[in-house]
Amino acid sequence: MKRPFSLFASLLALSLAVPAFAQAPAGGPPAGFEGFMAVMKQQLKPAPAPDITPIPLGAMGSPSDTQWETMEGYLTARNVTQPAIYPVLPAPGTANGTAVIIAPGGAFLTLAFDTEGREVAKYLAARGITCFVLTYRVDPTPHDIDGLVRTLGERMGKAPPKMTHGEIESPAESLAAQDGLAAVDYVRSHASDYGIDPHKVGFMGFSAGGMTTTNVATTYTATSRPDFVGVIYGAMHPRPVPADAPPAFVALAADDPLLGYASVPIFDAWREAGKPVELHIYARGSHGFGMRKTGTSSEHWIEDYYNWLVSEHLTSAK
Protein backbone atom coordinates (compact mmCIF):
# COMPACT_ATOMS: atom_id res chain seq x y z
CA MET A 1 0.00 0.00 0.00
CA LYS A 2 1.39 3.38 -0.98
CA ARG A 3 1.69 5.84 1.87
CA PRO A 4 -0.27 9.08 1.24
CA PHE A 5 1.95 12.03 0.45
CA SER A 6 0.12 14.75 2.37
CA LEU A 7 0.11 15.20 6.12
CA PHE A 8 -3.65 15.25 6.12
CA ALA A 9 -4.00 12.05 4.11
CA SER A 10 -1.42 10.33 6.30
CA LEU A 11 -3.31 11.24 9.44
CA LEU A 12 -6.61 10.23 7.87
CA ALA A 13 -5.30 6.76 7.04
CA LEU A 14 -4.23 6.25 10.64
CA SER A 15 -7.32 7.74 12.25
CA LEU A 16 -9.57 5.49 10.17
CA ALA A 17 -7.54 2.43 11.05
CA VAL A 18 -7.68 3.41 14.73
CA PRO A 19 -11.14 4.88 15.45
CA ALA A 20 -10.16 5.88 18.98
CA PHE A 21 -7.15 7.85 17.73
CA ALA A 22 -8.24 11.11 19.36
CA GLN A 23 -9.36 9.45 22.58
CA ALA A 24 -6.09 8.63 24.33
CA PRO A 25 -6.46 6.18 27.24
CA ALA A 26 -5.31 7.31 30.64
CA GLY A 27 -1.57 7.02 31.06
CA GLY A 28 -0.53 6.88 27.40
CA PRO A 29 -1.20 7.64 23.75
CA PRO A 30 -3.83 5.78 21.72
CA ALA A 31 -2.86 2.68 19.80
CA GLY A 32 -0.99 3.57 16.66
CA PHE A 33 -0.17 7.11 17.74
CA GLU A 34 3.43 6.49 18.67
CA GLY A 35 4.09 4.65 15.42
CA PHE A 36 2.56 7.44 13.43
CA MET A 37 4.60 9.99 15.31
CA ALA A 38 7.74 8.05 14.48
CA VAL A 39 6.85 8.06 10.78
CA MET A 40 6.09 11.77 10.86
CA LYS A 41 9.34 12.61 12.60
CA GLN A 42 11.21 10.65 9.98
CA GLN A 43 9.39 11.93 6.91
CA LEU A 44 8.46 15.54 7.69
CA LYS A 45 11.36 17.84 6.91
CA PRO A 46 11.75 21.64 6.99
CA ALA A 47 11.96 23.06 3.49
CA PRO A 48 12.46 26.39 1.75
CA ALA A 49 9.53 28.24 0.23
CA PRO A 50 8.77 27.42 -3.42
CA ASP A 51 10.84 29.22 -6.03
CA ILE A 52 7.81 31.22 -7.18
CA THR A 53 7.36 34.86 -6.22
CA PRO A 54 4.05 35.02 -4.33
CA ILE A 55 1.47 37.76 -4.73
CA PRO A 56 0.06 38.74 -1.32
CA LEU A 57 -3.69 39.19 -1.08
CA GLY A 58 -3.61 41.57 1.85
CA ALA A 59 -1.45 43.27 4.44
CA MET A 60 -2.52 40.98 7.27
CA GLY A 61 -0.08 38.55 8.82
CA SER A 62 3.42 37.93 7.51
CA PRO A 63 4.87 35.60 4.87
CA SER A 64 7.59 34.70 7.37
CA ASP A 65 4.96 32.96 9.51
CA THR A 66 4.39 30.28 6.88
CA GLN A 67 6.08 27.02 7.82
CA TRP A 68 7.22 25.10 4.73
CA GLU A 69 7.96 21.38 4.98
CA THR A 70 8.18 18.33 2.77
CA MET A 71 6.54 14.94 3.21
CA GLU A 72 8.27 12.34 1.04
CA GLY A 73 9.54 15.16 -1.13
CA TYR A 74 6.21 16.94 -1.63
CA LEU A 75 5.94 20.49 -0.36
CA THR A 76 3.38 21.46 2.28
CA ALA A 77 2.63 24.71 4.10
CA ARG A 78 1.08 25.56 7.45
CA ASN A 79 0.65 28.48 9.85
CA VAL A 80 -0.25 30.73 6.92
CA THR A 81 -1.26 34.17 8.20
CA GLN A 82 -0.85 36.18 4.98
CA PRO A 83 -2.79 34.74 2.04
CA ALA A 84 -1.07 34.73 -1.33
CA ILE A 85 -1.27 33.31 -4.82
CA TYR A 86 1.65 31.65 -6.59
CA PRO A 87 1.53 32.03 -10.40
CA VAL A 88 2.26 28.98 -12.55
CA LEU A 89 2.18 30.28 -16.11
CA PRO A 90 1.99 28.66 -19.54
CA ALA A 91 5.04 28.84 -21.77
CA PRO A 92 5.34 32.19 -23.58
CA GLY A 93 2.95 32.43 -26.48
CA THR A 94 0.79 29.47 -25.39
CA ALA A 95 -1.70 31.06 -22.95
CA ASN A 96 -5.28 30.63 -24.16
CA GLY A 97 -6.96 33.20 -21.90
CA THR A 98 -8.35 30.82 -19.26
CA ALA A 99 -7.24 31.11 -15.63
CA VAL A 100 -7.70 28.76 -12.68
CA ILE A 101 -7.06 29.48 -8.99
CA ILE A 102 -6.21 26.27 -7.12
CA ALA A 103 -6.87 25.81 -3.38
CA PRO A 104 -5.03 22.85 -1.79
CA GLY A 105 -6.55 20.89 1.06
CA GLY A 106 -5.37 19.94 4.54
CA ALA A 107 -8.22 20.18 7.09
CA PHE A 108 -7.70 23.97 7.36
CA LEU A 109 -4.48 23.14 9.23
CA THR A 110 -2.02 22.35 6.45
CA LEU A 111 -1.88 22.89 2.68
CA ALA A 112 -0.81 20.14 0.28
CA PHE A 113 0.94 22.72 -1.90
CA ASP A 114 2.36 20.25 -4.43
CA THR A 115 -0.01 17.30 -4.83
CA GLU A 116 -3.15 19.48 -4.68
CA GLY A 117 -1.66 22.69 -6.04
CA ARG A 118 1.52 23.09 -8.03
CA GLU A 119 1.32 19.69 -9.79
CA VAL A 120 -2.25 20.48 -10.87
CA ALA A 121 -1.11 23.88 -12.09
CA LYS A 122 1.74 22.40 -14.11
CA TYR A 123 -0.64 20.04 -15.91
CA LEU A 124 -3.07 22.82 -16.79
CA ALA A 125 -0.36 25.36 -17.67
CA ALA A 126 1.07 22.88 -20.18
CA ARG A 127 -2.32 23.15 -21.89
CA GLY A 128 -2.37 26.94 -22.01
CA ILE A 129 -4.22 27.68 -18.77
CA THR A 130 -2.80 30.37 -16.49
CA CYS A 131 -2.78 29.07 -12.92
CA PHE A 132 -2.45 30.48 -9.43
CA VAL A 133 -1.94 28.26 -6.37
CA LEU A 134 -3.67 29.82 -3.37
CA THR A 135 -2.18 29.63 0.11
CA TYR A 136 -5.15 30.70 2.21
CA ARG A 137 -5.14 31.37 5.93
CA VAL A 138 -5.33 28.26 8.09
CA ASP A 139 -5.71 27.54 11.79
CA PRO A 140 -2.43 27.73 13.74
CA THR A 141 -0.56 24.55 14.64
CA PRO A 142 2.37 24.04 17.03
CA HIS A 143 5.71 24.37 15.28
CA ASP A 144 6.96 21.05 16.62
CA ILE A 145 5.90 17.84 14.87
CA ASP A 146 4.48 16.23 18.02
CA GLY A 147 2.16 19.19 18.52
CA LEU A 148 1.21 19.28 14.85
CA VAL A 149 0.17 15.63 14.72
CA ARG A 150 -1.72 15.89 17.99
CA THR A 151 -3.63 18.92 16.65
CA LEU A 152 -4.46 17.05 13.45
CA GLY A 153 -5.56 14.05 15.46
CA GLU A 154 -7.86 16.11 17.64
CA ARG A 155 -9.51 17.69 14.61
CA MET A 156 -9.98 14.44 12.73
CA GLY A 157 -11.18 12.69 15.86
CA LYS A 158 -14.16 15.05 15.89
CA ALA A 159 -15.16 14.22 12.31
CA PRO A 160 -18.52 12.41 12.27
CA PRO A 161 -18.87 9.31 10.07
CA LYS A 162 -20.43 9.68 6.62
CA MET A 163 -20.22 13.47 6.56
CA THR A 164 -22.54 14.97 3.96
CA HIS A 165 -21.63 18.64 4.38
CA GLY A 166 -18.08 18.69 5.74
CA GLU A 167 -19.02 18.95 9.39
CA ILE A 168 -15.54 19.84 10.67
CA GLU A 169 -15.47 23.10 12.59
CA SER A 170 -12.60 25.44 11.78
CA PRO A 171 -12.24 29.10 12.74
CA ALA A 172 -10.18 29.57 9.57
CA GLU A 173 -12.87 28.36 7.18
CA SER A 174 -14.45 31.80 6.81
CA LEU A 175 -11.00 33.37 6.40
CA ALA A 176 -10.14 30.89 3.67
CA ALA A 177 -13.34 31.84 1.83
CA GLN A 178 -12.44 35.51 2.09
CA ASP A 179 -9.00 34.72 0.68
CA GLY A 180 -10.52 32.73 -2.18
CA LEU A 181 -12.85 35.57 -3.11
CA ALA A 182 -9.95 38.03 -2.91
CA ALA A 183 -7.95 35.79 -5.24
CA VAL A 184 -10.71 35.78 -7.86
CA ASP A 185 -11.04 39.54 -7.56
CA TYR A 186 -7.28 40.01 -7.94
CA VAL A 187 -6.87 37.75 -10.95
CA ARG A 188 -9.83 39.29 -12.75
CA SER A 189 -8.67 42.86 -12.06
CA HIS A 190 -5.19 41.95 -13.38
CA ALA A 191 -6.42 39.89 -16.31
CA SER A 192 -4.74 42.10 -18.90
CA ASP A 193 -1.37 41.63 -17.15
CA TYR A 194 -1.52 37.89 -17.75
CA GLY A 195 -3.40 37.73 -21.04
CA ILE A 196 -6.47 36.34 -19.29
CA ASP A 197 -10.06 36.63 -20.43
CA PRO A 198 -11.78 38.24 -17.38
CA HIS A 199 -14.83 36.07 -18.14
CA LYS A 200 -12.83 32.83 -17.86
CA VAL A 201 -11.49 32.97 -14.31
CA GLY A 202 -12.14 29.69 -12.51
CA PHE A 203 -11.61 28.35 -9.01
CA MET A 204 -11.00 24.79 -7.85
CA GLY A 205 -10.02 23.07 -4.63
CA PHE A 206 -9.44 19.82 -2.80
CA SER A 207 -10.94 18.66 0.52
CA ALA A 208 -10.79 21.78 2.74
CA GLY A 209 -9.88 23.63 -0.46
CA GLY A 210 -12.98 22.06 -2.00
CA MET A 211 -15.06 23.40 0.88
CA THR A 212 -13.44 26.77 0.23
CA THR A 213 -14.46 26.39 -3.42
CA THR A 214 -18.14 25.84 -2.59
CA ASN A 215 -18.03 28.77 -0.17
CA VAL A 216 -16.56 30.96 -2.91
CA ALA A 217 -19.10 29.63 -5.41
CA THR A 218 -22.07 30.57 -3.23
CA THR A 219 -21.03 33.83 -1.50
CA TYR A 220 -19.43 35.96 -4.22
CA THR A 221 -19.95 39.54 -5.33
CA ALA A 222 -20.02 40.78 -8.91
CA THR A 223 -16.23 41.11 -9.06
CA SER A 224 -15.36 37.95 -7.11
CA ARG A 225 -17.69 35.52 -8.88
CA PRO A 226 -15.73 32.62 -10.41
CA ASP A 227 -16.76 31.75 -13.96
CA PHE A 228 -16.50 28.01 -13.24
CA VAL A 229 -15.54 25.82 -10.29
CA GLY A 230 -14.05 22.41 -9.61
CA VAL A 231 -14.71 20.59 -6.34
CA ILE A 232 -12.45 17.58 -5.77
CA TYR A 233 -13.48 15.48 -2.75
CA GLY A 234 -14.96 18.60 -1.15
CA ALA A 235 -18.17 19.51 0.65
CA MET A 236 -20.77 22.24 0.81
CA HIS A 237 -22.74 23.77 3.66
CA PRO A 238 -26.53 23.68 3.23
CA ARG A 239 -27.31 26.97 1.53
CA PRO A 240 -29.11 28.10 -1.63
CA VAL A 241 -27.21 27.93 -4.88
CA PRO A 242 -27.24 31.43 -6.42
CA ALA A 243 -29.33 32.03 -9.51
CA ASP A 244 -26.17 32.92 -11.44
CA ALA A 245 -23.98 30.19 -9.94
CA PRO A 246 -21.06 29.13 -12.14
CA PRO A 247 -20.93 25.70 -13.80
CA ALA A 248 -19.37 23.07 -11.56
CA PHE A 249 -17.24 19.95 -11.94
CA VAL A 250 -17.35 17.56 -8.96
CA ALA A 251 -15.16 14.49 -8.43
CA LEU A 252 -14.48 11.99 -5.64
CA ALA A 253 -13.65 8.35 -4.96
CA ALA A 254 -16.46 6.04 -3.82
CA ASP A 255 -14.19 4.63 -1.12
CA ASP A 256 -13.37 8.04 0.34
CA PRO A 257 -13.75 7.40 4.09
CA LEU A 258 -14.04 11.07 5.02
CA LEU A 259 -16.07 12.95 2.40
CA GLY A 260 -17.37 10.08 0.30
CA TYR A 261 -20.96 11.16 0.97
CA ALA A 262 -20.43 14.91 0.61
CA SER A 263 -20.08 15.37 -3.15
CA VAL A 264 -23.47 14.07 -4.28
CA PRO A 265 -25.25 16.80 -2.24
CA ILE A 266 -23.21 19.39 -4.18
CA PHE A 267 -24.29 17.82 -7.47
CA ASP A 268 -27.92 17.69 -6.33
CA ALA A 269 -27.88 21.32 -5.15
CA TRP A 270 -26.51 22.55 -8.48
CA ARG A 271 -28.89 20.39 -10.50
CA GLU A 272 -31.92 21.45 -8.47
CA ALA A 273 -30.92 25.08 -9.08
CA GLY A 274 -30.87 24.35 -12.81
CA LYS A 275 -27.14 25.11 -13.10
CA PRO A 276 -24.66 23.11 -15.20
CA VAL A 277 -22.87 20.44 -13.16
CA GLU A 278 -20.89 17.27 -13.87
CA LEU A 279 -20.14 14.54 -11.32
CA HIS A 280 -17.44 11.85 -11.47
CA ILE A 281 -17.32 9.06 -8.89
CA TYR A 282 -14.31 6.77 -9.19
CA ALA A 283 -14.47 3.30 -7.64
CA ARG A 284 -11.24 3.68 -5.67
CA GLY A 285 -8.81 6.40 -4.69
CA SER A 286 -9.68 7.06 -1.05
CA HIS A 287 -9.27 10.65 0.20
CA GLY A 288 -6.50 12.98 -0.89
CA PHE A 289 -5.52 11.33 -4.17
CA GLY A 290 -4.74 14.68 -5.80
CA MET A 291 -2.05 14.26 -8.44
CA ARG A 292 -0.61 11.13 -6.86
CA LYS A 293 -0.24 7.94 -8.87
CA THR A 294 -2.75 5.67 -7.16
CA GLY A 295 -3.03 2.87 -9.70
CA THR A 296 -6.79 3.49 -9.82
CA SER A 297 -9.06 5.31 -12.24
CA SER A 298 -9.15 8.30 -9.87
CA GLU A 299 -5.69 9.34 -11.06
CA HIS A 300 -7.33 10.31 -14.36
CA TRP A 301 -9.60 12.92 -12.78
CA ILE A 302 -7.41 15.73 -14.12
CA GLU A 303 -7.98 14.52 -17.68
CA ASP A 304 -11.73 14.41 -17.07
CA TYR A 305 -11.60 17.90 -15.60
CA TYR A 306 -9.67 19.26 -18.58
CA ASN A 307 -12.04 17.56 -21.03
CA TRP A 308 -14.95 19.15 -19.16
CA LEU A 309 -13.36 22.59 -19.50
CA VAL A 310 -13.02 22.04 -23.24
CA SER A 311 -16.54 20.67 -23.67
CA GLU A 312 -18.03 23.61 -21.76
CA HIS A 313 -16.01 26.05 -23.91
CA LEU A 314 -14.20 27.29 -20.82
CA THR A 315 -10.82 26.67 -22.42
CA SER A 316 -9.55 25.75 -25.86
CA ALA A 317 -8.37 22.24 -26.68
CA LYS A 318 -4.69 21.54 -27.12
Image: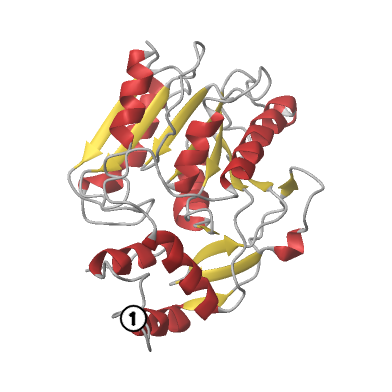
SS category of the residue bearing label 1: loop
Image position, residue 252 (x, y; %): 30, 41
Q: How many marks?
A: 1
**Quarter residue 49 falls in:** bottom right
Query: In this image, 178 relative to 294: left or right?
Result: right
Quarter placement of the N terminus: bottom left
Q: Is residue 205 visible?
A: no
Image position, residue 78 (x, y; %): 59, 62
- Which residue matches tag 1? 25
**Quarter residue 141 falls in:** bottom right
**Quarter residue 153 falls in:** bottom left
Q: Is residue 229 visible?
A: yes
Image position, residue 80 (x, y; %): 66, 57
As drawn, which residue projects farthest toward the right?
Answer: 59
Name the kind of residue labelled 1 in the image. Answer: Pro
Image position, residue 231 (x, y; %): 41, 36
Front in this rendered view, residue 88 or 270: 270
Q: Classify 2 as above or below 87.
A: below
Front in this rendered view, residue 122 or 239: 239
Q: Circle 1: is it few (<14), some (14-19), or many (20+) Cα within 10 Å?
A: few
Q: Classify 38 as above or below 149.
A: below
Residue in the picture at 53% in, 53% down? 108
Residue in the picture at 51% in, 80% down? 146
Residue in the picture at 57% in, 25% down? 226
